[in-house]
Image (cartoon, grey):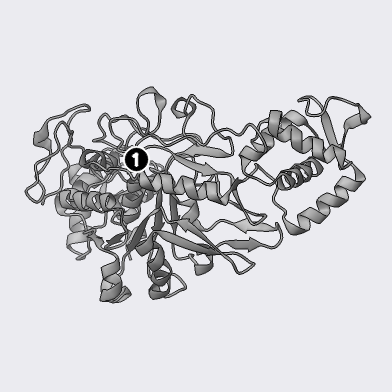
Amino acid sequence: MAESTNTPPPGTTDQAHYPAYAGIAPPAGGAHVSGAHVSGAPDPRPGPNSRPSGPAGAGASGGTGPTGAGGQPGTGPTSGTPPIGLPPRPTTVAETDLDPSFLEELSLKMVVSLGTISGNDLAERLRLPLAGVVEHAIGGLRRENLIEPVGGAQAVIGAAGINLRATERGAQRAHQITERSGYIGPAPVPLRAFDYALRQQLSGRRNITRDLVWRRLAHLVLDDEVVDRVGSGVQSGGPIFLYGHAGNGKTAIAAGVARMLTGGVFVPFAVEVDGQVFRVFDSSVHHPLPPEAQPSARFDERWVLCYPPFVQVGGELRLEQLDLLWNERQRYYDCPIQVKAAGGVLLIDDFGRQQHRPDDLLNRWIVPLETGVDYLTLISGGQVALPFTPLLVFATNLEPKQLMDDAFLRRLPCKVGIPDPTVEAYREIFRRACGDSGVEYADSGYTYLIQRYYDQAGRPRRASQPRDLLRLLISCARYFGVAPQLTQPLIDAAATLYFV
């Protein structure tokens, strides 16, 4: 089908804007927002403190974003996710589900690392209540003469304002503990609590609507059928295999898929297993929901309610990144990428260009994909079984049959080819790229570019080229001290730099 580059005004709900796909009627009440790939558009992945409420670029109309009425994640009209159960806030040491000695050891290491700390600050850093929980750890450490009040004041045990420091005996004990486990940070949650949270999120798998898919891909010029194939693949739960020439938006599509996953994902700071710890929360991929979208009820602060994560790896991917990695210097585990991506999207970009053969990587995914369970190995030789919850997306610019045989292709049921943009689509991409870069679009300049550097050269069009060409054109204009316009000299300067 032809690309859809016409977009209705914001808020339009005219069904005529929706094309029929495979004989299926368009969704009721939806706005056709299939837009164009906006060269130079903002990265759709959120920053650490913000999340766009809708897709970037022209054609984005309406939408409530990832939160619904009342600021509760997963309850808005664009969400198919039921509200996630809140992890209860512990009021006693037993309710933390951690061994009391583990909590005391973690508290001691933190006191030693900071030198002096108040009981209230210690509780905040551990993300646990002072009353009923941290005060018991403080009491136990004081009884063993491992910590003491600064100045020897006999303050009430557990008082928020008491300043604590380690005794000489406590410093020696902390050194011994660190030899075994060097983790210092928020108190971890036990493995079984993490397992339960992952299963809960998996059972509440999101119902992706066609309207939401089109909205989240509105910043791209894509054939209507491609958009619907991607949406169908997301609805199936994946994995999704995107293939096509480099520069046509495969990575941008995968990022858009992550934004289709509405609602929130609870991410623990860390997880405890057999007395050891592996970190989970990573500020580079886990972005907390804004305060107005957080639940009003208090919950266990060892968890962070985040947007569904988007984790991207490329040619640098190694098989060891897919397992628990023991950090010998820090004495704790580094978290595998698929666990960081739990509840979100894991993109294996540039598939086929890793150091390992595609067969080796696919063999690693067979069991998790077919059983929904991933097995991670501890340094002790034991294994940890966790639900496999990320939506796995592979993207490659190689031919699928060059990468794998029919048996592996069968295990990747959702295969979506991303074609080169047509003449009409490329013009729209270029027009919008001009708008983003501040260069006035001119038909004469565009026609010259196409005839001189595409038609005469027999060069294929790629969706990323307008953005790159215009960046070079602007740089050349600055160099020559002229205004950035679609003139023949500037087009020649940019194109001869760009094309080989």
Position in image of residue 334 (x %, y %): 60, 57
Alpha-carbon neighbours of circle 1 within 10 Å: few (<14), some, or many (≥20)?
some
> Residue, x 67% and y 55% (percent of image)?
275
Q: Mark 1 points at which residue?
A: 437
> Residue, x 69% and y 30% (percent of image)?
132
Q: Is residue 301 above or below residue 461?
A: above
> Residue, x 91% and y 26% (percent of image)?
153
Quarter of the image for residue 461 reads bottom left
Q: Which amino acid does label 1 sit on?
A: Ser
Q: In this view, does 339 lie above or below 12?
A: below
Identify the residue at the far left of this view.
23
Identify the residue at the far front of this view.
94
Q: Is residue 20 left or right of residue 363?
A: left
Q: Is residue 132 visible?
A: yes
Quarter of the image for residue 369 reads bottom left
Helix or strand or loop: what does disc 1 sit on? helix
Q: Can residue 34 be seen in this view?
A: no
Q: In this view, does 402 lie above or below 300?
A: below
> Residue, x 83% and y 34% (percent of image)?
164
Position in image of residue 125 (x %, y %): 68, 36
Quarter of the image for residue 408 reads bottom left
Q: Quadrant of the C terminus?
A: bottom left
Nearer to the camera, 154 or 456: 154
Position in image of residue 198 (x %, y %): 45, 48
Position in image of residue 304 (x %, y %): 53, 38
Nearer to the camera, 57 or 253: 253
Nearer to the camera, 107 or 219: 107
Q: Is residue 55 above or below residue 24?
A: above
Question: How many numbered markers are drawn?
Answer: 1
